[in-house]
């Protein structure tokens, strides 16, 4: 039997009822057959425990993974303040889960442990094909989470996923494994079996102004730019004081005006968004910016962001071995939604234009995207074909 995926989305106000409705819709869309895996993305406006209980009232004993989100992505478009439930039924694919805690203590070790657990539980008779990870993007260094997973799976192994989000509050995110809800963690889903994966990623953000030098940093803490407290670059560019920036919320400003490091070998920019400012003027990010590198402030353009969606899709299409596409996973940064607003639905329209109107899509708006590296402001596309 071919692999099938069904996604249900609910915006009901009651947490249990919304989880139940999303699961019922997904169950209906796979013909009410038994699923092999549940993937859930739940807005933090909901009570997380009640939402999962609602899902479990319909889909009781199937392995479950997911995280909190800033919006759901599916064939029908995008939905903020929602619960998304995707069910996959497949005889060709086996699924195994891993979880690791204490991302803030040792991000690399957490990425390694999540991948190790998932691999240890995998069906050894089937070839491992891809790892999907959902991490706490407000704790530790997400680039190190990826490195840790690559230590276990290999640097060329396809790793995809997103950083959990919390509706632009930048306070607390959640990760799920089965009936357990975690924070400061990374959850991993390993795909094994007769499936091919093509991955593409792009962002479309462009540099503005002259480059600046990172003169002091430590892991994901950006301390000084041009030998001055890092926060001053935003004070100058936005014409606001430190206190005004903190009151507005640096995380919200950061998704509109992130940093970019030019990757000379690829002639493109790696994008990083600050999450918050410390009292000494340092900036906390969810991945590192190395000391000694030149950086630019970056700015988004709607047309270029949508063109990046097309670019990511075409890259993914070029990386699949055949065209019998079963489903698509899409992880888009919340900064893209902030930029595109009413045009954000065009991202899913582009995906459907390239891959087909009826190909199932699962995804969410995230605080960072995994696809060969870790980026902010990007859209990551993973195409699963048989």
Image (cartoon, rainbow, N blue to C red):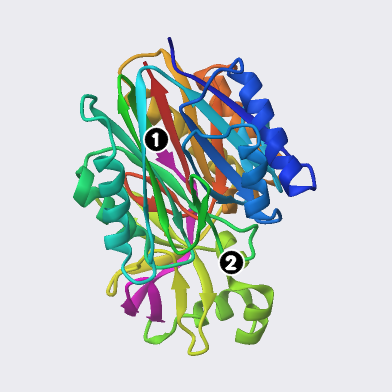
Q: Is residue 259 above or below residue 131?
A: below
Q: Mark 1 touching mark 2, by CB under 8 A?
A: no
Badge 1, how many Cα within 10 Å: few under 14, some, many 20+?
many
**Residue drawn at (57%, 34%) of the image:** 60
Relative placement, left or right, of 282 versus 72 is left
Q: In which quarter of the image is residue 246?
A: bottom right
* Residue range highlighted in magenta: 201-225
Residue designated by label 2: 170
**Residue 205 part of the magenta-drawn span:** yes
**Residue drawn at (59%, 72%) of the image:** 250
* Residue 376 percent coordinates (x, y): 46, 55
**Residue drawn at (49%, 44%) of the image:** 178
Q: In this view, does 221 lie above or below 145?
A: below
Relative placement, left or right, of 91 versus 368 is left
**Residue 25 part of the magenta-drawn span:** no
* Residue 168 percent coordinates (x, y): 63, 61
Question: Residue lying farthest bottom?
Answer: 280
Q: In this view, does 131 lie above or below 328?
A: below
The one nearer the camera, 237 or 362, is 362
The one nearer the camera, 28 or 180, is 180
């Amino acid at each position: 039997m071919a692999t099938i995926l069904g996604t249900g989305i609910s915006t009901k106000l009651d947490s249990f009822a919304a989880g139940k409705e999303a699961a019922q819709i997904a169950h209906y869309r796979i013909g009410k057959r038994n699923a092999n895996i549940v993937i859930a993305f739940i807005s933090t406006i909901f009570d997380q425990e009640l939402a999962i209980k609602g899902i479990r009232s319909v889909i009781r004993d199937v392995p479950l993974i997911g995280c909190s989100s800033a919006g759901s992505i599916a064939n029908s478009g995008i939905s903020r303040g929602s619960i998304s439930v995707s069910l996959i039924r497949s005889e060709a694919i086996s699924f195994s889960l891993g979880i690791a805690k204490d991302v803030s203590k040792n991000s690399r070790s957490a990425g390694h442990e999540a991948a190790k657990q998932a691999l240890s539980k995998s069906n050894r008779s089937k070839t491992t094909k891809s790892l999907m990870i959902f991490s706490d993007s407000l704790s530790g260094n997400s680039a190190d989470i990826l490195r840790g997973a690559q230590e276990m799976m290999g640097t060329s192994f396809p790793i995809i996923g997103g950083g959990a989000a919390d509706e632009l509050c930048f306070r607390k995110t959640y990760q799920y494994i089965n009936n357990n809800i975690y924070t400061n963690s990374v959850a991993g889903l390993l795909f094994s079996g007769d499936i091919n994966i093509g991955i593409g990623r792009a962002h479309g953000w462009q540099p503005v102004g002259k480059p600046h030098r990172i003169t002091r940093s430590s892991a994901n803490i950006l301390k000084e730019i041009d030998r001055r407290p890092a926060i001053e670059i935003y004070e100058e560019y936005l014409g606001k004081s430190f206190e005004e920036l903190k009151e507005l919320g640096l995380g919200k400003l950061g998704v509109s005006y992130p940093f970019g490091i030019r990757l000379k070998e690829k002639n493109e920019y790696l994008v990083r968004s600050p999450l918050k400012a410390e009292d000494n003027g340092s900036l906390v990010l969810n991945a590192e910016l190395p000391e000694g590198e030149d950086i630019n402030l970056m700015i988004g353009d709607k047309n270029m962001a949508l063109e990046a969606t097309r670019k990511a899709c075409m890259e993914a299409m070029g990386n699949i071995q055949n065209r019998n596409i079963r489903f698509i996973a899409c992880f888009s940064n919340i900064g893209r939604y902030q930029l595109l607003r009413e045009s954000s639905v065009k991202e899913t329209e582009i995906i459907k234009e390239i891959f087909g109107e009826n190909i199932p899509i699962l995804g969410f708006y995230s605080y960072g995207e995994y696809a060969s590296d870790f980026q902010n402001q990007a859209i990551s596309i993973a195409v699963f074909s048989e």
